[in-house]
Image: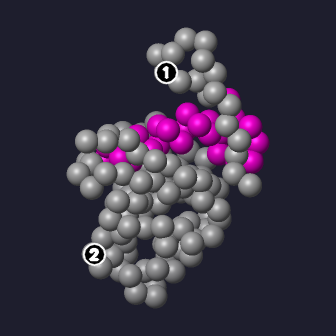
Amino acid sequence: MNEEIHISVLGKDPEAALKELSPCTMVAGRSHDDFLYIFNAADEYMVFSHTLGFSEGGRKSFGKDDKGTAIVKNLLDVAESVFAVEFGRDFNIYGVMCSAEEAIINMFPSADVDLNEDIDFFIPNRENQKTKTKGRS
């Protein structure tokens, strides 16, 4: 079984971000040290929140009616950066959120990083290997 999650940087378009939601894709939003995770449940949006440095987070659900959808879009609209996170169907949701948060922090240590600039990062447990990646255009 593949035990990887895949993270994509999305633009600041809440409508497009919501279209990314599927049973195996969540949308994550980041504003400074606050993270928001949105999952597509059967008839509602499940929204989890977490602030770095705190052991607990929050959870709310919103219906997929006009009001609930508007609330979720507004939450995404105020996020500084938005990501799509793909994961396996059998994955533990809390593990997915924790892994996504750690990966986002490691790749973008500051929420105000320009997503189009070059980013240097190191692959753990591999000495002297430096990888450079280009941001999205």
Residue positioned 58% across, 24% down in the render: 122
Q: Is 40 on the left or on the right of 67, as rendered?
A: left
The answer to whether 135 appears left or right of 6 in the picture is right
User: Is residue 57 visible in this depiction of the protein?
Assistant: no
Disc 2 crowd, CA 10 A, few/some/many (<14, 14-19, 20+): few
Q: On the rendered image, what quadrant is the C terminus found in?
A: bottom right
Image coordinates for residue 25, horizontal then vertical, percent: 40, 60
Tell me which amino acid carries mark 2: Ala
Residue 42, numbered label: 2
Q: Which numbered disc flags the more N-terminal residue, 2 or 1?
A: 2
Look at the numbered disc 2 and give the secondary structure of its residue: loop
Residue found at x 25% / y 42%: 1
Q: How many marks?
A: 2
The location of residue 58, given as percent across then percent down, is: 37, 56
Q: Is residue 64 above or below residue 136?
A: below
Question: Which residue is outermost to the bottom?
Answer: 66
Q: Is residue 32 left or right of residue 21?
A: right
Residue 77 vertical position relative to residue 101 in the rendered view, above or below: below
- Give the quarter of the image for residue 131: top right
Three-letter residue code for mark 1? Pro
User: Which of the pair 48/54 is nearer the observer?
Assistant: 48
Magenta span = 94-120
Q: Which residue is mark 1?
A: 124
- Residue 7, position as x, y percentages in the image: 50, 49
Q: Are circles 2 and 1 on residues that touch, CB within 8 Å?
A: no
> Is residue 63 a member of the stretch shown in magenta?
no
Residue at image location 38% in from the left, 67% down from the top: 22
